[in-house]
Amino acid sequence: MARFDADYLKTLPIFSQISKEHLQWLLSVAEVRELQAGELLFDKGEPIYHMYLVLEGQLDQSLVTNGQQRVVLNVKKGEVTGLLPFSRLKVTGGRSVAHVPTSLLCLHQRHFPEMEQVSQEMTQQLVALMTDRVREFTRSEQQQEKLLALGKLSAGLAHELNNPASVIVRSSTELLRMNHTVPDKFKRILTMRITPAQVDEINDVLFSKIEDGLQSNLSMLERSSLEEELIDWMEDKGVEDSYKLAETFVASGLQLADLDKISAILKGKYLAEVLEWLSNTLETERVICDIQAASKRISELVNAVKAYSHMDRGQEKEKTNILGGIKSTLTMLTHKLKEKKIRVEQHFPPDLPAVHAYVGELNQVWTNLIDNAIDAMPEGGTLTISAGQENEYLAVRIADNGSGIPPEAMPHIFEPFYTTKPIGHGTGLGLDIVHKIVMHHGATIKVNSKPGETVFELCFSLD
């Protein structure tokens, strides 16, 4: 320990105001440990008995996140890690490895009471330092938790947006192809000699199908049977491309009676040309409807993102109906719900009262609670969300029929860094964040859990 004497310790900012006499005591009861680069100091979950001061070198502190070891803190020369006076830490929360050859001053916890007697200044300095370090580490982990949640939501949202976007691309390509055939079909239509009355009657047949939504409620077997009937009918009439026309007509809800009616209106003339025009119009209408529906879905998703992220709104507390935030959160988590075939039951009265809240923060609460519920449930589970006024409070309940929370975990679920999820699947900050946000709102949260039923209940004051 010769090269690490009291004069050396006084060069470290943490001990610059500590007397040499007190530093000499520290050196007399502590021991120096040398680590090679890459050598493990401690691993996650190990009992912790020592305070470690880095004399030279650097330690890398890491946690497992999403199945990967991630460095979250560098402990450099003059900095402290491990156990400290008054700390309730029992086991290590992560892994600590020497980044380069590193020298450590190791003080066992049995000397902490004596330290308090020998040097209150040293004790206070160490406690203040570790308090700042824990605060910084917690803030970093909370930010990481938010980023992980955002990543999950982004992946699901990308999947949800991809489906309607693909429909638009596919349908617009089909519409362009159909448009290229219009000149040739228009030429054949111009050679037709039918009366305005006949045109009106054919349009009546066409628009009756459009008004019905171009839907066919037939089973696959019934559709196949009807297609064969229409093909036979058109082939008997000498109509070409009867297979393609039959597929369009059946998909649009046309029956054999409709073709008989059209044939009667035309009195057997220009039947092939009119049926081709009718098919083209129905296909165009269907493609446009597909594009319209897909565009509407994209618009709904964008609106859900705006509502969820509280974009273009202030960060002040405001009167809000919690139903909008819950529904936008469910939209953001649609992909995850679909993956596990989770059924969602919602029970909200029509006169649900509004509460004063920070809407963006509440959406974090809904996300963490709903996401945890999905993780806890088996495939095909049921998520039940309900809300209602109870006296002077608005009560919100989020329930799942998953495996439940182990009894031994119940007292700890709102503690930071505590998690019941497998390693790499959670940082243990989700419910801690939920609890802090609920407290920020002056609200309460409680949980009841047993196998097959876990219910989180939140109560907001209506004052």
Image (spheres, rainbow, N blue to C red):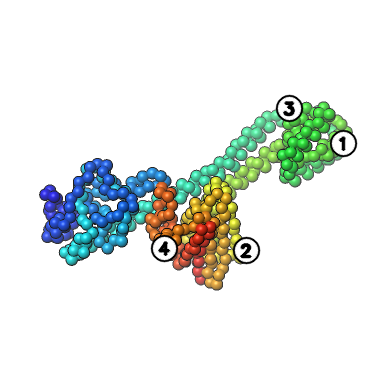
Q: Nearer the viewer, mark 3 or mark 2?
A: 2
Q: CA distance from mark 4 to mark 2?
A: 36 Å
**Residue shown at 43%/64% (left/top)?**
439
* Amino acid at the residue labelled 3: Asp
Residue lying at the far bottom of the rendered structure:
391
Return the residue at label 4.
411
Q: Position of residue 375 (x, y in %)?
A: 49, 51
Q: CA distance from mark 1 to mark 4?
A: 80 Å
The residue at which mark 3 appears reads as: 184
Name the residue located 80 percent from the left edge and 34 percent from the top edge. Answer: 229
* Along the viewing direction, whichever of 272 and 69 lies nearer the viewer: 69
Q: Secondary structure at mark 2?
A: loop
For mark 2, what is the residue? 350
The reply to whether dot 4 and dot 3 touch (C-beta < 8 Å) is no
According to the image, label 1 marks what residue? 264
Lower sequence index among marks 4 and 3: 3
Give the class, few, some or many, for how many residues have Cα within 10 Å of label 1's Cα (few <14, many ≥20).
Answer: few
Please name the residue shown 41% across and 55% down the image: 419
Q: Are marks 3 and 2 in contact (CB under 8 Å)?
A: no
Q: Is residue 219 placed above or below 143 in the rendered structure? A: above
Q: Pointers 4 and 2 in contact (CB under 8 A)?
A: no
CA distance for labels 1 and 3 = 26 Å
Q: Amino acid at mark 4?
A: Pro
**Callout 3 secondary element:** helix
Q: Which mark is residue 406?
A: none
Q: Residues within 10 Å of mark 4 (few under 14, many from 20)?
A: few
Disc 4 vs disc 2: which is toward the camera?
A: 4
